[in-house]
């Protein structure tokens, strides 16, 4: 059902379970995601598949659904021959589909409109490197139109996610100003630093003191580094932390496939919550069954 509380209010009372990877669930449903638009292609070609994937996570225990707009950009849609009006409509549809799935149960479920980094539009793995050669102002100009389009669809929060460096985080937060929609900010990290190699404490500090930000943290990273990152984010910002790593595998952009071993242990969610995480779930390659296990691991956790 549509929530009666804001997400910020919910985070003050306990840990809220996020969903897992949308793309892996869509693939499990038989969808072909080889296109550069990835799951965003299905906003036009298979919206019922997206709603079904969201519904699978609601059944699994997720109470925040992240929309299929991670790679939904005006530039990406234009390459498919879609104009601005059509692109705005598809971005809005991403929120509508998540909301429809959320309304299937009699519990509060929040919808987070995904705002992926500039590198997601390039579809070449750049989001795991950052440093695109663009200024903060140029990145802000890129992000603002789609943030405005997504905010107009009235999600509960904007998920500024998989951000590889602090410069893009600054640009995203600037672009979200005036949208009237709360945001969370999550970096993709490696070795205790941003993917661009920046000091993680300084990166988290970009969002400190920003009243629009309901949580700061990490996503789409190795689960092994999450606990330390969560503790650092809580110390730097003094607010709720979001944590949703991937399976532990690594994305090979050239082969367009995941490599390595699974390393996501749902039991670790309890340690993340103890370190300050209030939004906990999974990212790429983390499916509904794992989210059910995460929800079970978190069932007794409350803020201290």
Image (tube, rainbow, N blue to C red):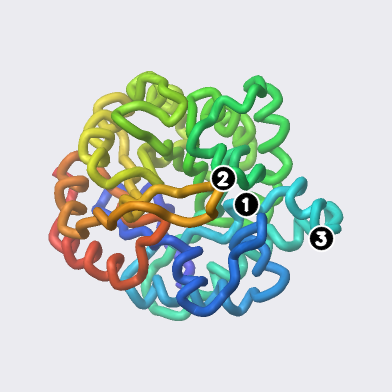
Residue 220 is left or right of residue 142, and the answer is: left
From the viewer's perspective, is residue 200 above or below residue 292?
above
Question: What residue sits right under mark 1 in the picture?
Answer: 71
The crowd level at tag 1 (other Cα within 10 Å; few <14, some 14-19, many 20+) is: many
Nearer-N-terminus badge (3/1):
1
CB atoms of marks 2 and 1 within 8 Å: yes
Indicate the position of residue 86 as horizontal and vertical percent values. Answer: 81, 60
The picture quadrant where one finds residue 133 is top right
Q: Which residue is drawn at 45% across and 38% down?
A: 185
CA gap, disc 3 and disc 2? 19 Å
Question: What residue sits right under mark 3 in the picture?
Answer: 86
CA gap, disc 3 and disc 1? 15 Å
The picture quadrant where one finds residue 301 is bottom left
Q: Which mark is drawn over residue 116? A: 2
From the viewer's perspective, is residue 45 above or below residue 214?
below
CA gap, disc 2 and disc 1? 6 Å
Q: Nearer the viewer, mark 3 or mark 2?
A: 2
Residue 135 is left or right of residue 231, and the answer is: right
Nearer-N-terminus badge (2/1):
1
The picture quadrant where one finds residue 247 is bottom left
């Amino acid at each position: 059902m549509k929530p009666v509380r804001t997400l910020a209010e919910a985070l003050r009372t306990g840990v809220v379970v996020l969903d897992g990877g949308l793309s892996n669930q869509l693939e499990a449903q038989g969808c072909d995601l080889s296109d550069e638009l990835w799951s965003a292609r299905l906003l036009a070609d298979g919206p019922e598949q997206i709603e079904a994937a969201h519904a699978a996570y609601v059944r699994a225990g997720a109470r925040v659904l992240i929309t299929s707009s991670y790679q939904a950009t005006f530039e990406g849609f234009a390459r498919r021959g879609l104009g601005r009006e059509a692109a705005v409509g598809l971005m809005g549809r991403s929120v509508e589909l998540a909301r429809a799935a959320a309304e299937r149960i009699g519990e509060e479920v929040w919808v987070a409109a995904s705002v992926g980094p500039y590198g997601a539009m390039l579809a070449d793995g750049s989001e795991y490197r950052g440093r695109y050669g663009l200024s903060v102002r140029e990145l802000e100009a890129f992000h603002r139109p789609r943030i405005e389009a997504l905010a107009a669809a009235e999600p509960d929060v904007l998920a500024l996610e998989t951000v590889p460096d602090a410069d893009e985080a600054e640009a995203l937060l600037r672009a979200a100003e005036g949208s009237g929609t709360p945001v969370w900010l999550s970096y993709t990290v490696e070795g205790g630093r941003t993917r661009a190699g920046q000091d993680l404490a300084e990166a988290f500090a970009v969002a400190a003191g920003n009243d629009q930000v309901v949580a700061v943290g990490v996503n789409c990273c190795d689960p092994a580094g999450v606990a330390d990152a969560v503790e650092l984010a809580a110390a730097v910002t003094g607010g709720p932390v979001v944590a949703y790593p991937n399976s532990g595998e690594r994305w090979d952009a050239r082969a367009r496939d995941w490599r390595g071993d699974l390393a996501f242990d749902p039991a670790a969610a309890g340690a993340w919550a103890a370190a300050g995480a209030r939004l906990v779930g999974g990212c790429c390659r983390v499916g509904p069954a794992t989210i059910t296990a995460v929800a079970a691991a978190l069932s007794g956790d409350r803020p201290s």
